[in-house]
Amino acid sequence: MTSPIHRLLKRQYTRLFRDGRGTPFHMLRRLLRAISDTYRQDDEQRRLLERSLDIGSQEIAQRTAQLRTVFQMYPDAFLTVDGTGVIVEATGATGEPGAPYSWLDRPLAEFPNADIGRRFSQAFLRARETRGPASFEYSLARGAEVVFYEARLRFLEEGHVAVVVRDVSDRRIALEALRTAEERFALAARAANDGLWDWDLPVNRIVYSPRWKSILGYGDEEVPNAPNAWMDRVHPEDVESLRRGLASLSEPGRDTLEIEYRVRHRDNSYRWVATRAIAVRNASGLTHRLVGSMTDITPHKAVEEQLRHEAFHDKVTGLANRALFLDRLTNILDRVKRQPGYLFAVLYVDLDRFSTINERVGHEAADRLLQTVAARLRSYARVGDTVARLGDDEFAVLLDGIANERAAVVFAERMRELIAAPVDLEPDEISVTASLGIVINSPETNDAEALLNEAESAMQRAKQGGKNRQELFNRETHAHLVSKLRIETELRHAAERGELELFYQPIYRLADQKIIRVESLLRWRHPQRGMVSPADLIPIAEETGLILVLGDWILREVSEQAKRWRQAGIAPLTIAVNFSPRQFQQQNLLTTVGATLARFKDSGFPLELEITEGAAMHDVDLSVKIMKNLRDMDVRISIDDFGVGYSSLSCLRLFPLNTLKIDRGFVDGIPGVKDNASITNAIIGIGHSLGLSVVAEGVETDEQLAYLKQQGCDEVQGYLLSRPLCAKDVTPRLPKVGANGSNGT
């Protein structure tokens, strides 16, 4: 191989001697000059080349350092392995799997240890043979921890193999957590017995879980992953509401849905299911996915339906109960508002003497009797009518649409006949009758409960009228009863509210027209009605038993008033208190009166009880006994309203009385009305013959006063002389104790 100098010399020599120009000396000189020029040019080229090589080496070193820095920023190790399996390049992670720089020129089969190195060698051979990628995972202990790595190998064109080693511990932990969560979710879903579904909205594809399909009776491969597989099986009455509910999850703020509906099973029956859905939104806030569950709630719905039926039906008879009856009655009242003039009737049925029959035949047989009555009522009712059991022996029938009042009455009569038919209860045959109340709707009727109460009120009147009959409700009568009930309710609290007050009507001695007694009279100042008439007050109190409470209050108030009069210097005078028949017959009468007398003791005012003639004659022997005990307690006794009862003179003679009071009905009209005058004269004569004082009530005219005085009547009271007055107004009229301590009378 010749150098550039040799080639230059040869070229110059050939040119010189071929041209034949100049002497050999000159040719030699030119040759030497050419050689010198050639060396100078070559040296310059060499220096330029060296300088270029220096610059290139610096750039390569700089770029290499930069690449090494970049690789070191990654948590991976980068190795290059030559065709013999030796690591010829190493960079990247400085920690485990082993400072890569320290593995330069070492065999890959030992990286990072012999056991794992064998797996590297196997992957290295696969990559070279297939000229494609190869990978595997391994783990190394790092102190108390185990670190997981992933190795990826790729064949390079030069016959080398590139190796990348990455720490995948975090990924392995995340994957393990995900696997555990998925397993936990699968177990929870299986335990919850729910079917799951996942709807990808952009592609309109639904994935159903095996349990979702099994709820409908299908295997895992029998239901396609399409929305129609779901919607086509939903009950026609429910599918639209389900579609609307799912569509609403695309609206802002609507992220969840819970809905119940019916879906067709494989056996063509419909099952009740509950679906819960959640909307999954993308970064733009648009719903792109729906996920949810489906639960079979058919057993729950069956129990719910049973409970609903039991809530609105009677267990013994299977009839509608009170709640369902009132609901249907309310519906009819709504119809009447839309159809003025529409007539219907409510029948309230009560079995007569059922409690006696129940005690006689026993509970089980009594239930069979109720079931028979219920069946008879149901059999006679028309389509659209409602038959209900309201209580133990009470039923109701709603006649939906009648021609007139007479139609309801005829229906009730036929119903009573059906009920009265004998019932075979083995071994007994029982006949039971019924009392019925009938009410017809009216324009002012707008409340179901009130209408049923009206029917019951009519039934109660039927019972009071002798049982086994029907009674048509009369609204005027009912209004009176309601008023009585309202008065009773308000009267119970009248005393504690301070609404009760005692008035006193003076009783005058006819001989000198001086006050010798006062009669206490109860008054009720109602906050809305004003002064309530005693004619309205006393009968209600007597009927309800409130008269006993009022009587105790009157006795306490009278005793307190006697003390106040005594302190005011009023001369002791008799205070008369009216006693009703119920008060007179109470067992603790003597105890009650005794307590009152104890309070009267210091006042010195005598107490007189006015008893009606009828109360005294109710039980003559008992009355005589009570009156004698009262007399022994220094209580005066007067027969009030004498002449309107039926007492005989022989009985009257047995009573330890002090006074007879002539009823105002006989005083009215005298002396012009001969009969009244005759009866008045007779009573005065009877009283005197028995040694009793006689008082005439209701004296309102001078003629009456003069006639009574002429006939020898002892005492009088009435509007002519004084109306009943409150304690404040009557006090100035009462006689005072004289200066010497004697009474003002």
Image (cartoon, grey):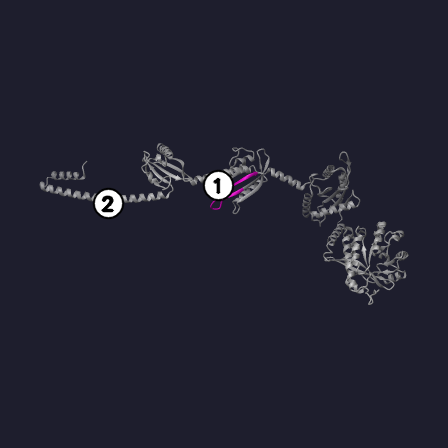
Residue at the far top: name it.
Answer: 129
**Residue 182, position as x, y percentages in the image:** 49, 38
Residue at the far bottom: name it.
Answer: 739
Q: Is residue 28 magenta?
A: no
Displayed quadrant of residue 232:
top right
Is label 2 in contact with label 1 (beta carbons under 8 Å)?
no
Secondary structure mostly seen in the magenta stretch: strand
Q: Is residue 132 left or right of residue 226?
A: left
**Residue 256, position as x, y percentages in the image:** 54, 44
Read off the residue under disc 1.
202
Res. 51 mark: 2
Q: Is residue 282 magenta?
A: yes
Q: Residue shown at 60%/35% (left/top)?
A: 269
Q: Is residue 59 left or right of residue 440?
A: left
Q: Is residue 349 above or below residue 541?
A: above
CA–CA distance in space, label 2 to label 1: 65 Å
Residue 77 visible here:
yes
- Residue type at numbered disc 1: Pro
